[in-house]
Every structure is written in structure tokens, then in C-alpha cells.
Amino acid sequence: MKKALYVLVIGLGIGLASCCGCRKVKSLPITGTEWQLIEMNGKVIDRPEGGEQYSLRLGDDGRFSGMGDCNRCMGGYTLDEKRDRIEFSQVASTRMMCPNQQQENQYFAILNDARGYKIDGQFLLLLNDQRNIIASFKNVGNPDANAEHVVR
């Protein structure tokens, strides 16, 4: 009887530990993920359905690329993942006149204003100096985002 109770207690302990809410969910990597802008300064982005407009991709080499309304953007960035800090530099773009030029100009200005970031599930949030959200992006190109990443 004692042995059966001991086995039951051990089994319950293992079962509870495996269901524990203390498991950490690993975020998507900020680099190598295709991000699409969905909100900027609290306003939803006006984008044609299925378009690649307002995208951002950070390479492992300290360079970024993306798309505005109709212009490609590129430049450098520095990243401090321990402090959740990011700073874009040398933001440049092609110079075509776009249907929504004002929105594109705001997007490029947001990149210059970003000083921090946070990844929340499938979302990348860019933050200003006061740690306020200035832009929200959604993962659109990382197949690992649909799989649950659990770190034990």
C-alpha cells in the first residue's frame, strides 16, 4: 500500500510539473523575421490587400531592409538584446512619389525615432525614448511562429 501511494505521489508530481505555468515561451528572433507594420503612432496602417508595403527585415549583419508605401528602405541598426534597445542609422530609401507619401514619410521617421523594442508573441513593438509604443509589426515570414516554442 505504501509503495502504491509513493508511486501515485511521484506520478502526480511529475504530471503537475509538466503542466506548470512556469514554462517560458520563447519569442521570435528579431533578426531574420519578416515584419509587417500594422500600426503606427496608434493608427492602423492603410495598405492594399496582399501588398508587401510597410515591411521590415533585420539582417544578422547589422543592416536592415524594408518597404514603405512604394519605396524600398535600407540602412544600419545597432541592437542590444539584453536591454531591449535598438537604434536605426543611415535610414535611406528610393525616392519615387507614392500614393500615400505622407504615411511613408511617417514610417521612415518612426525608424529614426526608435530606441527600444519588445517582442510579444508574433508582434514586434518599436518604442521611443520614453518606452512608449510608436509602431507595431506582425510576423509574416517566419514559419517557426506557428509552432509553440517552450523553454524548460
Image (spheres, grey):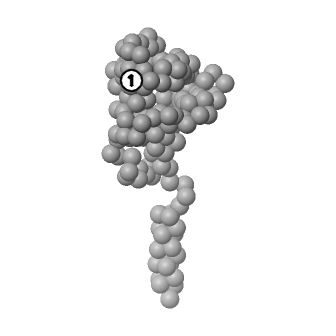
Residue depicted at x 60% and y 29%? 41
Q: Is residue 62 visible?
A: no
- For the residue pair 44 and 2, the one nearer the viewer reads as 44
Q: Residue furthest front?
A: 99
The residue that label 1 is drawn on is 70
In the rendering, at what x and y percent does residue 97 appear?
41, 16
Drawn side of residue 15 relative to residue 41, left or right:
left
Look at the numbered disc 1 and give the secondary structure of its residue.
loop
The answer to whether one can see residue 6 in this image is yes
Relative image position of residue 31 (x, y in whole percent): 38, 30
- Up-down: is 146 above or below 110? below
Q: Residue at x 42, y 36 (%)?
A: 48
Residue occupying image coordinates x 41% and y 50%: 149
Compared with residue 16, is residue 108 higher up or lower down, i.e. above or below?
A: above
**Which of the pair 48/115 is nearer the observer?**
48
| Residue plotted at (52% across, 42% down) | 120
Q: Relative to the observer, which residue lies in front, 25 or 20?
A: 25
Locate residue 26 relative to residue 110 in the image: left or right. left
Classify residue 32 by image quadrant.
top left
Q: Is residue 143 left or right of residue 133?
A: left
Amino acid carrying label 1: it is: Cys
Q: Position of residue 11 (x, y in %)?
A: 47, 74
Residue placed farthest to the bottom in the image? Answer: 1
Percent x, y for residue 25?
48, 49
Residue in the foreground of this view, choosing between 18 and 76: 76
Crowding near pointer 1: few (<14 within 10 Å), some, many (20+)? some
Left or right placement of residue 76 versus residue 120 in this view: left
